[in-house]
Amino acid sequence: MSQIIASAAESKTEARFTASFATTPQAILETQKLRYQIFAGELGAQIDGGADGVDRDEYDAHCQHLIVRDADGKLVACTRILTDEAAARAGGFYSSGEFELSMIDSLPGRVMEVGRTCVHADYRSGAVIATLWQGLAAFFTRNGYDYLFGCASIGLEDGGAQAHAILRQVQAKYMAPSYQRVRPYHSLPASDIAPPDKVRMPPLLKAYVSLGAKACGDAYWDQDFNCADVFMLLNVSDICPRYARHFLGIQPATSATVVRVQA
């Protein structure tokens, strides 16, 4: 059994969710199938998943795969962590295929990348997202990482109108200073579609900015995944105190809590 590193419940009557690391080939395959189900099946990403419908790449072998299960053991969310040490063995970070990342090399301290994050369509609740982030928080605090970064994606199903509206909000409120910018290799093109009256920030992007992460420049246009990727950087020491209490478990027992249970 994997070590449980975080748990949460939406209410007293709802099932609890637990976060742990996938430590067997079978568990990692589960995450790859969930990724394919969401990215290719739901979002229309151009992924060669083979006959079994699996999203895998060369980085998976170097990553630690964080998963969230419900009370029945069903996999409901996952993400993967690529540490600076593992990235050196992998030939670089995944994001380096989308952005020029020399800025990351200049950061003081240890860094880790988060990617391929997805949540099952039936479980996109605050408790699941919180459990996933609790697991990340437990990992970076236990191992002494100073920075976390990754891409938060915005879908382009409407031709990009909503994405541009969200990006304007990000640029107005959540931009990193000029010395912490990265450059996308393929920028999101302009859209001539009228923006919607109201837009909703995607859950992962919302979680990033709520914690205090900053956007590090223009979005990358990922044509294979039909999305705009926003490069987000979180300085662990800058985490918003209210969200630090939430994600690090300093809350009443009825809320999300971080636990460490040995296998």
Image: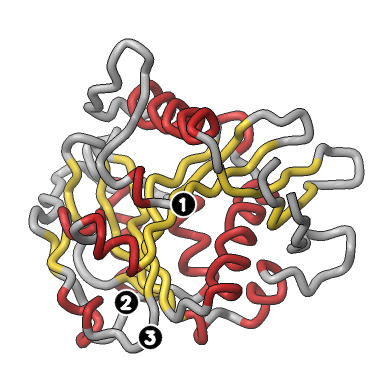
Location of residue 111 with respect to 158 vertically, above or below: below
Identity of the residue drawn at 38% across and 85% down: 109
User: Disc 2 to disc 1, how far (Cα)?
Assistant: 29 Å
User: Hey, what amino acid is under mark 1?
Assistant: Gln
Report the residue marked by disc 3: 109
Count up the numbered dots. Answer: 3
**Quadrant of the rendered image containing residue 15:** top right
Location of residue 261 with respect to 210 vertically, above or below: above
Which disc number belongs to residue 175? 2
User: Disc 3 to disc 2, how far (Cα)?
Assistant: 21 Å
Quadrant, the N terminus: top right
Q: Which is nearer the eye, 77 or 60?
A: 60
Which disc number belongs to residue 198? none
Residue 64, percent across and down? 46, 52
Marked residue nearer the N-terminal end (3 or 2): 3
User: Which mark's residue is nearer the viewer, 2 or 1?
Assistant: 1
Residue 106 located left or right of residue 172: left
Report the residue marked by disc 1: 64
- Residue 169 shows in the view: no
Marked residue nearer the N-terminal end (3 or 1): 1
Secondary structure found at label 3: loop
Identity of the residue drawn at 60% across and 35% down: 76
Residue 119 located left or right of residue 49: right
**Quadrant of the rendered image containing residue 215:** bottom left
Location of residue 33 with respect to 59 vertically, above or below: above
User: Hey, what amino acid is under mark 3?
Assistant: Gly
